[in-house]
Amino acid sequence: MPTTPAAPTESGPEPLDRLPGRQPAAAELARTAARRAGDLLAPPAPVRLGDVVPAPERVLPDPAADFTLTTDAAIRVSPAGRDVAEQLAEWLRPATGFPLAVTDGPLPADGPLVLTLSETPLTEPAGGVDAADPGGLGDEGYRLDVTPAGVRITAATAAGLFHGAQTVRQLFPAAIDGAAPAAERWAVPGGSIVDRPRFPYRGAMLDVARHFFPVEGVLRVVDHLARYKLNHLHLHLTDDQGWRIGVDSWPRLAEVGGATEVGGGTGGFYTQADYRRIVAYAARRHVTVVPEIDLPGHTNAALVAYPELAPGKVAPPPYTGTEVGFSYVDPADERTYAFVADVVGEVAALTPGPWLHLGGDEAFKVPADTYRAFVERAQTIVAATGKTVVGWHQLAPAGHVDGRVLQWWGTNGDDPETAEAVRRGARLILSPGNRVYLDMKYTADTPIGHDWAGLIDVHRAYDWDPGMHLTGVPAEAVLGVEAPLWTESVTTLAEVEFMLFPRLPAVAELGWSPRSTHDWAGFRERLAGHGPRWTAAGITFHPSPDVPWPAAPTVPTQRTDDTTADTH
């Protein structure tokens, strides 16, 4: 049901478009005219229409059409888009102090803020783009129009509407991300934006196995992804150092296997209720959770909990170091495959998204033929749950199953084995270790992180093309891009943010924006404007010297318990 519009305030009369059939009084008309005249005389909006990250497909500025949000504004929305409108209001209320009532029902031709789901193909503004799909903007695209009378977002889906709302959020002054009212003119630059993503899969991975992060921390990471139109969160839930998801049929996995982490901490795990909460929170922000159960290696925590899964049927000691490749489940025991079926069955049932990640990397002690046989059987088990198999590119030699996706994390763009898997039908998610592994140090003196794949500053994270990165792999085989954050040396949410920012927006732009928009000089200038936004939001970030920040942010305190690792 529509809500009751906010009552008039001292700052102005009830907006005329909320009073159908009522003739405005002369004094009311005079006040409206005075306000509009003031808008015309006001300085330009402090943010330019083209300052958005990731860069939109098409930007058509109109410097004479800036819009100013006032305290009596409301957000009008078609009913199916109401949840997006509520989120936009939640973002804007704290800093503006405005009530920003959300109303659904018949939409006016214009109004302060209007969000609508279009039942017809979206069209582009005059002088539109040359695009493969000129009749519409797909499942995630949107059109934004800003005039002095209001802001309108139009999309074919709620996801597109949400991405458009994130763009509007960026077009307000940086203080919009603060938690308390600020004295600002809340202006949005005039013009039109037409936007859609280059790749359907755009994500980041958080390793919660090496170090455990509570639910609230994961939710904050979801918000960071959604802010930059990333739409997948890959959770690395199991490894040698910890098992982080409750499994009813094998309860000791979490109770015993979840009690450790790198460095000897107490670890932790997500109950199934916790996991459902993460999934639901992400879904509201149009982020799909991709769970990873790493098999057949990286399984020491599982073997501690259930020794019958170990090749020698003897429990190994808990592991809190950072070496890799020494553990594996017994591929010759049928009990192992019952374990796999039970675990992936429960995790699949908890996960509404289409993907289930099998890991598959660094099983160094499993002979090649045995490894292939295990993976082929495990892939079939996953497919039987209705999920699409995702795995690290070490799965490439195994037989193909329909829809299989390989996540490539190499550092050399010439990989014939992966290219052959693509020829057999696999698609790829690109995560080159020397470009987007966010656990790599920025510089040699970065206080946390590793350098086995090299140093990765924000320029290096940005300066590559996922569509042309692997020899022999056509762009149409690339599903998208993902930036993993392994946490051997990362222990707090502030450290997570320090490693994500400013590189995460760089990866987001590679995944979302057309290749024609990629330009380091322009990107670094746009990115610089986000430093004040992160500061306002309390987000820790690395003050990369590559970026002309308006003000110097702070750096986390030097840690003394840094650990090292040379791979996953």
Image: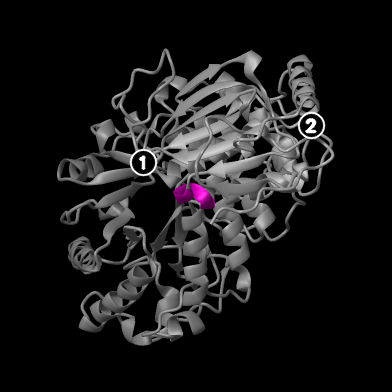
Q: How many numbered dots are placed on residues in this image?
A: 2
Task: Point out which mark residue 139 bears.
Answer: 1
- State the residue at coordinates (39%, 46%): 409
Dot 2 and dot 1 residues touching (CB under 8 Å) = no
Q: Amino acid at mark 1?
A: Asp
Q: Main secondary structure of the magenta part?
A: helix
- Secondary structure category for the residue under label 2: loop
- Pointer 2 or 1: first along the chain: 1
Residue 53 in percent (x, y) is at 56, 32
Closer to us: 367 or 223? 223
Q: Is residue 491 placed above or below 143 in the rendered structure?
A: below
Image-based side of 22 in relation to 222, left or right: right
Q: Residue at x 52, y 68 (%)?
A: 277
Q: For the residues carrying marks 2 and 1, which lies nearer the camera in this image?
A: 1
Say which element carries label 1.
Answer: loop
Mark 2 belongs to which amino acid?
Ala
Magenta part of the chain: 79-83
Q: Position of residue 111 (x, y in %)?
A: 60, 33
Q: Nearer the viewer, residue 451 or 7?
A: 7
Image: 106 above or below 560: above
Task: Identify the coloring.
Answer: one colour
Q: Let me know if residue 454 appears in the view.
A: no
Task: Name the spot of residue 555 as percent of width and height, x first.
Answer: 75, 45
Of 457 and 339, which appears nearest the observer?
Answer: 339
The residue at which mark 2 appears reads as 551
